Image (cartoon, grey):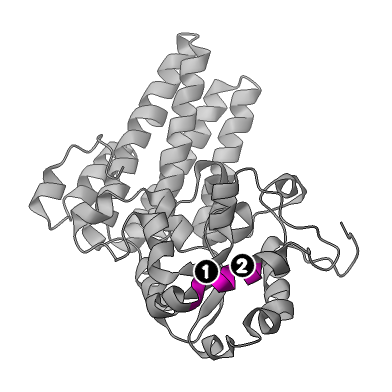
Amino acid sequence: MREDADTPATGLALSRAFFEATVNELLAGGYEYLRGRMAAGLVGAGSECLGFDDEFSRDHDWGPGYCVWLDPTDWRESGAALQERYRAIAARGFDGFPPRDTTSESLGERRVGVFPVDGFYAWLLGSPGLPSSIDEWRRIPERALATAANGEVFIDTSGRFTSVRKRLLAYYPNDLRLKLIAHDCAVAAQAGQYNFGRQTRRDEDLAALSCLARFSETVTHAVYALSRRYAPFYKWAPRGLDTLGPLGLEMHEALDAALAAWRTGNVELAEVQIERASHVLVEALHAEGLSQSDEGFLLAQAIEVNSRICDDALRAADLMAPVTV
C-alpha cells in the first residue's frame, strides 16, 4: 500500500479519486448514455462513509470502491453487466491500493458496486419508499437511517437517488424528534443524575459504570436529535459529537471529564461533570424553545419537552420506553 504525501487522507477521498479515474472505462462500449441517468458516490456501511476511518480501519472492508445507483429500468437492462464490469475494474486495485478485503462477501458486495436506487434504500431501510407515518419511522433502526444519509454523492444526473436522500436528511418528523429528546432526558436523569452516585456509594462499581455509560449514550443521542442528525453506530457516536458544532463539543468535553474523574476514583468530580453535561443539555433546550423550566434535574426537562408533542398517542407513551426499534 502506498504511503506518501499523495495518499488520500480518507476512504471517501480514495473513493472519489477511484470513481473519477475509472468511470469512463466503466461506461465505455455502450453504457455511455447512463452518465446522464445515474448517481454515484459512497454511502452506506463503513467508517469511511462517516469520514472516521483511520489506519485501524484498513484491515477489513476498506479500499478503492464506490457505488453506482441506477433507475429501475436501467438496472433491469444493464445492471448485471455493469456490475460484472465494475468487479473487474475493482479487482485491479487502484493507485497502489489493493482491492478491498471484505470480511463477508455478501456484505462486501453491498457496500460498493452497482445497485438499483430502490433496492439500495430497501436494503438499508427495509422498504424501497420513504416512511409516511410516525409508526413507520419508528420501525426503522436509527443506525440504518444514519447509514442511508451518510457519505457523499459525487454525481446524480437523474436526481432519483438524491430526492430520497434529501428527505432523509431532513430528519424525523418533529413529534418523533421531541419524543426522542424527552426519552433521552428521562433516561439520563435516572442513570446519571440519580443512580450513578448511589451505586458508587454502594461500591457497585460495575453498576456505576453502567450508569455512567447509559447517561453518556443518552445525552449524546439528545445532542444528535437537537442537531437533527441521526446517531450513527454506537462506537462512532461520541466521535461524531465533534461534528455537531459548539453544543457537540461542549458535551464531549463534559463527558470526557466525567469519565476521567471516574477513572481516578473521584466520584464527586464525576458527579460535577455529569451535572455540567446536564446543564449543557438544559441550555440547549432553552435555546430551541423546547423548555422554559430552570430545573436542573433532566426528568423535569423531559416532561416539558414531551408536553410539546402534538400526537396524542406519542405524547402519552411511556417516557422510559424505547422510542424506535
| Dominant secondary-structure state across the stretch colored magenta | helix
Q: Callout 1, which amino acid?
A: Ala
Q: Is residue 47 left or right of residue 99?
A: left
Residue positioned 18% across, 37% down in the render: 318
Image height of 217 relative to 281, above or below: above
Give how far across and how far down residue 205 sits, in percent: 52, 14
Question: In the figure, residue 267 lies in which quadrant?
Answer: top right
Q: Residue at x 58, y 73 (%)?
A: 82
Which residues are the magenta region? 78-86
- Camera-side residue of 305 and 241: 241
Q: Is residue 291 visible?
A: no
Q: Position of residue 185 (x, y in %)?
A: 33, 41
Residue 46 belongs to the span the image colors magenta: no
The mark found on residue 84 in the picture is 2
- Which is nearer the eye, 68 or 209? 68
Sort mark 2 into few (<14), some (14-19) or many (20+) by Cα contacts within 10 Å: some
For label 1, the residue is 80
